[in-house]
Amino acid sequence: MHALKPWHIAVLVVVLILLFGAKRLPDAARSLGRSLRIIKAETKSLADDDKDLAEKADAQHGRQPYQADPVIEPTSVHQPGYQPPAPDQPQRVRDAN
């Protein structure tokens, strides 16, 4: 019902030619195209700037994935040569590396 039909376009072209003249229409179309390219480039650069700012903010805060402390396994009772520590001596923790 509200579709744009070919005769609507023809009437629009005739009105534009009458208002602006045939010589000025190509210049107007060129300047409109340039303006659209500039707007497209600026919006793209704004989106890139937002990504760069987000990356810099993450780098400044030093966000690293969480890494748990290495697990220190107690000395097993079943190992050969195991001797339980004396009650008055502190237990030694084995280095996980």
Image: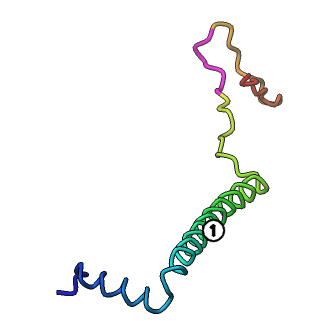
Q: Nearer the viewer, residue 4 or 75?
A: 4
Q: How many marks?
A: 1
* Residue 76 part of the magenta segment: yes
Taking the spot 43% from the left edge, 87% from the top edge, the residue there is: 16
Query: How packed is label 1: few (under 14 Cα within 10 Å), some, or many (20 or more)?
Result: few
Which residue is denoted by mark 1 in the rendering? Answer: 38
Please tell me whether residue 83 belongs to the stretch shown in magenta. no
What secondary structure is marked by label 1? helix
Start-end of magenta stretch: 73-79
What percent of the width, then of the height, locates residue 60? Answer: 79, 55
Query: What secondary structure is the magenta-colored segment mainly?
Result: loop
For the C terminus, the quadrant is top right
The x and y percentages for residue 57 are 74, 59
For the point 68% across and 13% down, the residue is 82
Residue 92: x, y in percent?
79, 26
Please state which of residues 24 and 58 is positioned toward the viewer in this rendering: 24
The amino acid pointed to by label 1 is Ile
Q: Residue at x 22, y 87 (%)?
A: 2
Residue 3 lies in quadrant: bottom left
